[in-house]
Image (cartoon, grey):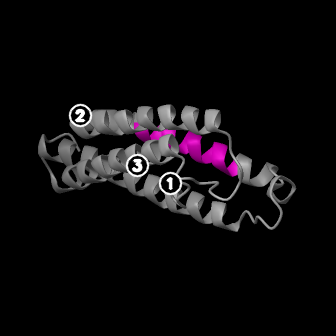
């Protein structure tokens, strides 16, 4: 296993733990910034339950990619789609209409941090593949 693949695997297992924490936070309704992106916007139990199950699925996806880094490309693509969805929500939702005094700034910060993480995964996904190809004499 090359250095970039080790970094990628550690990053993927970190993502699995993160999404498992999101799942647990939503199951128990614990509105923690970072685990609830829209932490200060009212939500319903059924929404939190749905997000909990979906976050568990993301945790499983990251874990599968950790076990077999070839699946990391799927994680990267899914992450970019999720980021586009979050950006769309942040742009198109009038949060002040839902809850007075709520600003989208914290949501953009969390989206930006997830973007950095996705960029990190993208880079090490590419790098680990390149290093593997170099070792076998293809790159």
In the rendered image, which quarter is residue 97 located in?
A: bottom right
- Residue at the limit of the structure toward the right, as seen here: 97
Which residue has dot 2 on it? 68
Label 3, label 2: how far apart the Cα atoms are:
22 Å
Badge 2 local density, few (<14 within 10 Å), some, or many (20+)?
few
- The front one of 138 and 50 is 50
Residue 33's place in the image compared with 16, above or below, is below
Which residue has dot 3 on it? 21
Q: How many marks?
A: 3
Task: Please identify, in this view, whether the residue under mark 3 or under mark 2 is nearer the observer.
Answer: 3
Instruction: Locate residue 16 relative to residue 92 in the image: left or right.
Output: left
Residue 99's place in the image compared with 17, above or below, is below
- The front one of 47 and 6 is 47
Task: Please identify, in this view, whether the residue under mark 1 or under mark 2 is nearer the observer.
Answer: 1
**Comes first in the chain, label 3 or label 1:** 3
State which region is magenta.
75-87
Q: Is residue 38 shown in magenta?
A: no
Badge 3 local density, few (<14 within 10 Å), some, or many (20+)?
some
Label 3, label 1: how far apart the Cα atoms are:
7 Å
């Amino acid at each position: 296993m090359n250095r970039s693949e080790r970094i990628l695997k550690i990053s993927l297992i970190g993502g699995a733990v993160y999404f498992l924490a999101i799942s647990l936070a939503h199951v128990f309704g614990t509105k923690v910034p970072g685990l609830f992106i829209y932490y200060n916007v009212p939500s319903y139990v059924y929404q939190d339950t749905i997000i909990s199950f979906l976050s568990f699925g993301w945790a499983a996806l990251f874990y599968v990619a950790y076990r077999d880094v070839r699946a990391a490309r799927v994680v990267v693509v899914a992450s970019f789609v999720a980021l586009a969805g979050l950006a769309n929500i942040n742009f198109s939702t009038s949060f002040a209409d839902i809850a007075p005094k709520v600003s989208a700034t914290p949501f953009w910060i969390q989206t930006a941090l997830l973007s950095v993480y996705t960029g990190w995964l993208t880079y090490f996904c590419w790098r680990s593949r390149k290093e593997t190809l170099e070792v076998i004499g293809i790159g």
